[in-house]
Image (cartoon, rainbow, N blue to C red):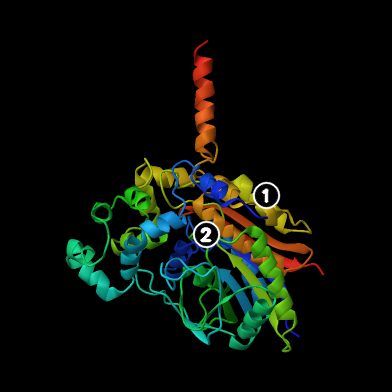
Amino acid sequence: MARITAGVGSSHVPLLGVAVDQGKTGDDYFGPIFAGYEWTREWEKREKPDVVILVYNDHASAFDASIIPTFAIGCGERYKPADEGWGPRAVPDVEGHADLAWHIAQSLILDDFDMTIINEMDVDHGLTVPLSMMFGQPEAWPTKVIPLAVNVVTYPVPSGNRCWALGEGIARAVASFPEDLNVQIWGTGGMSHQLQGPRAGLLNREWDTKFMDLLVGDSQAARAIPHIEYLRETGSEGIEMVMWLIMRGALGRETKLLHRHYHIPCSNTAIGHIVLDPAE
Amino acid sequence: MNQDIHEYLAELEDIPGTRVFTARRARQGYHLNQFAMSLMKPENRERWKADERAYLDEWPMSEEQKQAVLARDYNRCLDLGGNVYFLAKVFSTDGLSFAEAVSTMTDMTFPEYREMMLNGGRSAEGNRSIKANRAAAGAADQQGGY
């Protein structure tokens, strides 16, 4: 049977991709950020996941304003890195796992989650930056990836509670897949940041720390955090953190902390990273 | 978990210096954002760079929106329904980093903005609610009257 063996949370700031692609990961600015991912890189080499369900948001790359799916799952065979305005990143294509993806899509729909199914799309920094953070610069990504794109741009975005519940549904779906697969789920985006307007540059270490605390153990408090709290406390783009709750929801009743990292700033953003083990 | 939609939307307008990308803004800015999106294609970037005004005139945008884009007035673009992830295609084509483009929306120069970020960013303190700020200012005025 397939099983979810771990959850990873990580920011996906595009500048981190630039740092990797231009070999700057050890300099004064980026060094402390990347140092916090070293543990995870070693851990991933041992864990060797077969598939990563990668929860992220598209930043006006694959989806324009014409179609706005709330939850969309990639069921294709492979995905190319998107050209976000400065040419595509020189990273490997992302290989999908169509069998598991379609199984999850079908299971979720029968479980009352009305998923959008995507067969073809390009994937932007929201998806490729976390892969670079966890795996560096390999010839080919060492895992298959199921992209799960969430609308966190056009309001209303899904509630934290709905995201958590979707994670629970994903866990049920994975558990009913007959093939023996080591599956991880990653929630990406955040942490506090605001990229627009005169209030741009807002960061909130205290709130971010509290949010990470809530992901460890058996608390379900994070699912009740309303949108307005993310907006007021963590900036307009801090809302991306609802995607971490899909990851947390998929890990079951209780989690154990394996690794945690926080750094301010990267460009406009607070970098957060957490690795969780489902306790059961 | 059900929430009254009117209360929900009203709260989104209560954040200082912020334009939450609501349905109203998404409708108002639809063509502005789709124009920006078109710059993801290299051939469109070339045509845009060659003649910005002519390129904009191919889109059913308001004159205000076109002027805001030509002036790279990103706060004005936000007011007219632009979304930063779409507008990013414009400033990326200009060769600006995200941080530099974002700094133009604040009252700081880019070096000042960078310095603020290195020092921990802008505090949420005093930046959470327009209403709360007004109430605090009112209370301060009353105290000043003594």
Residue A31: mark: 2
> Which residue lies at the image location 31% right of the left edge and 74% below the top edge?
B41
Is residue A50 in view from this perspective?
A: no
User: Which residue is more in the foreground, A257 or A68?
Assistant: A68
User: To which chain does the residue with label 2 belong?
Assistant: A
Residue A95: mark: none
User: To which chain does the residue with label 1 belong?
Assistant: A
Work out which residue is located at the far top of the displayed protein and give it: B146
User: Which residue is more in the foreground, A178 or A108?
Assistant: A108
Instruction: Determine the CA span between mark 2 and mark 1.
Output: 25 Å
Q: Which corner quadrant holds the C terminus of chain A?
A: bottom right
**Secondary element at tag 1:** helix
Q: Residues within 10 Å of mark 1 (few under 14, many from 20)?
A: few
**Secondary element at tag 2:** helix
Q: Position of residue B119 (x, y in %)?
A: 50, 43
Q: Quadrant of residue A88?
A: bottom left
User: Which residue is more in the foreground, A12 or B59?
Assistant: B59
- Count of marks placed on residues: 2
User: Which residue is more in the foreground, A203 or A99?
Assistant: A99
Where A161 falls versus A228 (above or below)?
below
Query: Which mark's residue is nearer the viewer, 2 or 1?
Result: 1
Q: Quadrant of residue A190?
A: bottom right
Q: Which corner quadrant holds the N terminus of chain A?
A: bottom right
> Which residue lies at the image location 43% right of the left edge and 55% below the top edge?
B24
Q: Position of residue A50 (x, y in %)?
A: 65, 83
Residue A210: mark: 1
Is B77 on the left-hand or right-hand side of A40?
left
Q: Position of residue A251 (x, y in %)?
A: 73, 68
**What amino acid type is highlighted by mark number 2?**
Gly
Is A109 on the left-hand or right-hand side of A240?
right
